[in-house]
Amino acid sequence: MSRTLGMVAAFAASALIVLFVRDAGEQFILGMDSNWRFLFALVTGAATGGALGAAMEWGLIRPLYSRPIYQILLTLGLTFVFDQVVRFVWGPAGAFMEIPKWFSTKSKECPSDNLLVWFNQHCDSIFIMGRPFPSYRLFIILVGVIMVIAIWLLLTRTRFGMIIRAGVQDSEMVEALGINVRRVFTLVFAIGAALAGLGGVVAAPFLGVYPGMALEFLLQAFIVVVIGGLGSIPGAVAGALLVGLARAYGDNIVLSGIQLPWMQDAITGSPALARASTVLIMAIVLFIKPTGIFGKKE
């Protein structure tokens, strides 16, 4: 109980500190070059996420490992808490983050299908299959691929990954071998939170940042994991591709509408239909294979 109260007090104190130093910090950061500002955001986002993740696991999650439902309720509740903290400190309005100059330069040679020219000129787009494709979107895709490969290698090709998998399967046996499983789980939670912070910073120039975005993407992440299968990295990749394609095609249909040959006007729909399409895919997958595409029965 004292540990939980300490964590709540620490979060409250952190919010007040951020509130007091906000103006000076904003002036310092906004005075940076866009490239350095982006690098600063990447480092601080990952570091802050990792620190918060470790603190949350140690103070709040660890006592609830034997009660998974409580873990879900707690983390969902923390999402609302942090959302309100963001509103209190920065207000309800969203914010825009400038795309770094590395990916936004416009010149006579841009866009280009020559990788060397594209790299040297820092073009804002590149020709792919005869069509211009935004460079920053390509960067986001590259970061996602690197993250997936790095996590897969960590879990399957390293001693630390073996300890993680063994600790999940039989933590008591791993403890008997002299390994501090609790410390390992804290580190895993911190790594996951750091990657979430890093992903948020990478997506910010493309999507912007606003209160409530965590819940929106939390739902999409949940759908991805359920479609792919719990505990499966290939499943997460497949689920993300399905959800992404469904959203892209859904948004396109909503904007352009559907017009059959015998129709005079196209039928348009609400943007909510694009989001609903991902839920429909999840329902179909679970109906056919309840464990998900790559999931296995325990």
Image (spheres, rainbow, N blue to C red):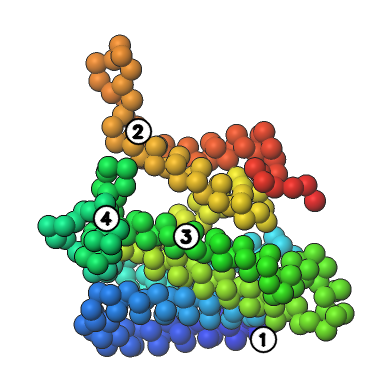
The residue under label 3 is: 144
Sequence-first tag of 2 and 3: 3
How far separated are the C-alphas under marks 1 and 4? 61 Å
Residue 210 visible in the snapshot: no
In the shown orientation, is residue 236 left or right of residue 34?
Answer: right
In the shown orientation, is residue 293 left or right of residue 9?
Answer: right
Q: Residue at x 40, y 88 (%)?
A: 17
Q: Amino acid at mark 1?
A: Ser
Label 1 Cα crowd, 10 Å radius (few <14 / some 14-19 / many 20+): few
Sequence-first tag of 3 and 1: 1
The residue under label 4 is: 114
Q: Residue at x 27, y 55 (%)?
A: 114
Quarter of the rendering containing residue 285: top right
How far separated are the C-alphas under marks 2 and 3? 26 Å
Sequence-first tag of 4 and 3: 4
Give how far across and how far down residue 169 sits, in percent. Answer: 80, 64
The residue under label 2 is: 253
Give how far across and how far down residue 162 sits, in percent. Answer: 74, 70
How far separated are the C-alphas under marks 3 and 1? 39 Å
Q: Residue at x 67, y 86 (%)?
A: 2
Give how far across and how far down residue 209 sits, in percent. Answer: 34, 64
The residue under label 1 is: 2
Q: Circle 4 — which element? A: loop
Give how far across and how far down residue 42 sits, in percent. Answer: 40, 75
